[in-house]
Image (spheres, rainbow, N blue to C red):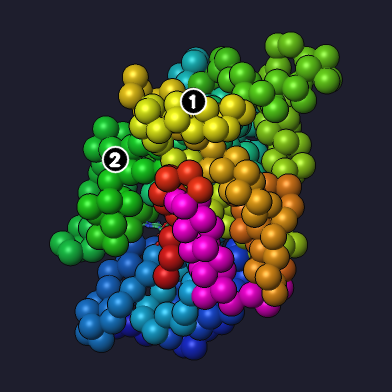
Amino acid sequence: MSNTDLSISRNVDLADLATMHVSAKAGTLIEIHSIEDLQRAFELIKQQDAEFLILGGGSNILFVDDFDGVILNIKLKGISIIEETEDHVLLKIAAGENWHELVMYCVSQGWGGIENLALIPGKVGAAPIQNIGAYGAELSDVLVELDAWMIETQTNNTFSNAECKFGYRESVFKSHLKGKVVITSLTIRLAKNHIPNFEYGALKAVLESRGITKPSIKQVCEAVIEVRQSKLPDPNELGNNGSFFKNPVIDVFLFNELKQKYPNIPGYPVTEHQVKVPAGWLIDQAGWKGYREGDAGVHKKQALVLVNYGNATGQEMYDLSERIKQDIRKKFGIELVREVNIV
Ligand SMILES: Cc1cc2nc3c(=O)[nH]c(=O)nc-3n(C[C@H](O)[C@H](O)[C@H](O)COP(=O)(O)OP(=O)(O)OC[C@H]3O[C@@H](n4cnc5c(N)ncnc54)[C@H](O)[C@@H]3O)c2cc1C
């Protein structure tokens, strides 16, 4: 099979292909528009014994260095209805579609289930990797199954929701199948008579301020967008990766100890023995909110978001995250885990 049909670029600047907008170069970048492109690209990767990386919208990747290998830029397109009944619709969406545009399309059709996930940057194919979630909803609530290209066997495989082993910002694709599959499409089930979930404090407050007590899907979506725009920097204006760290889940004994010292510490029970603590609260409490050194900083309004004010390098962003991690360990005895993929 020839590689001549592939769209291949060499020595590519990655600054605009990832939302932290740090400067880095990719040795080779191949655009993937079809499964045949994937096949050909992996032949090339094998021939050259090259390292590879799957790239969606680059909103959850920080490049700390140049990447000498091959980057596969997923551009698979298409949305189709594969089943429609009076009360639900099953949609199959190709991995290269934009997530937020998908949400807006579904909301405009009156199909509910992903309206709380509006304005999350990135592509559809990356959504299962960390089981994207916001405002009380997660992808796993609506995902029926997904198609993935198995890199080793060069075959397609379908994973049911259960086989994806979803958890909080986790899936099997982030653990033991990491780097072994390319997700090519998702199938999701959306409801036509959906009862929106707007229990999350900030959403409720926006809706109440508008006198809305029984919001439609569209009104919840609009509230989500308003809350997000008021809190989170737009990556097109200020480089960032959204939440840099996951919210740590800690032992209830440690939580109770911390509560003595910090009576305001927020905590949400996960199990009888475990409590989830907002990482943003810890970072804020430790005094990092608004911190800036050169062009690397911690956002002024949201301590969980590290920002690139212009010319910070990936290494500077990483070093800042490392210093925050060490400080949180020292002050609270809690080990923060990065949500962002470091390359
Ligand atoms: C401002 C901002 C707000 C955010 N808010 C949220 C939020 O509320 N909730 C949330 O969960 N996340 C949030 N994120 C994180 C991010 O948007 C999501 O993780 C998103 O799903 C990443 O999509 P992407 O296409 O940009 O993935 P990328 O950053 O390109 O890739 C992320 C990872 O997935 C892998 N990958 C990408 N596509 C595929 C594929 N098709 N097959 C296999 N592997 C693949 C990559 O190799 C990489 O390891 C936010 C980010 C930003 C910048």
Tag 2: Cα neighbours inside 10 Å, few (<14), some, or many (≥20)? many
Toward the viewer: 12 or 134? 134
- Front-most of 82 and 159? 159
Q: Residue furthest right?
A: 210
Q: Which mark is residue 161?
A: none
Q: How many marks?
A: 2
**In what element is the residue under mark 1?**
strand
| Residue at point 39%, 84% (across, down) | 68
Of 180 and 291, the residue lying toward us: 291
**Vertical order, 253 against 305 (above or below):** above
- What amino acid type is highlighted by mark number 2? Cys
In the rendered image, residue 11, in percent from the top left (x then y), is placed at: 49, 88
The magenta stretch is 310-330
Measured from the top left, where is residue 276 in percent x and y? Answer: 45, 32
Q: Quadrant of residue 2?
A: bottom left
Q: Is 181 on the left-hand or right-hand side of 61?
A: left
Residue positioned most to the front: 261
Q: Residue at x 62, y 44 (%)?
A: 285
Q: Which residue is mark 1?
A: 268
Q: Cα distance, mark 2 to mark 1?
A: 25 Å
Q: Residues within 10 Å of mark 1 (few under 14, many from 20)?
A: few
Q: Is residue 69 left or right of residue 280?
A: left
Q: Quadrant of the C terminus?
A: bottom left
Q: Is residue 313 magenta?
A: yes
Give amino acid for label 1.
Tyr
Residue occupying image coordinates x 49% and y 33%? 258
Q: Earlier in the sequence, mark 2 or mark 1?
A: 2
User: On the rendered structure, is 1 left or right of 327?
Assistant: left
Q: Main secondary structure of the magenta part?
A: helix
The residue indicated by pointer 2 is 164
Q: Quadrant of residue 5?
A: bottom left
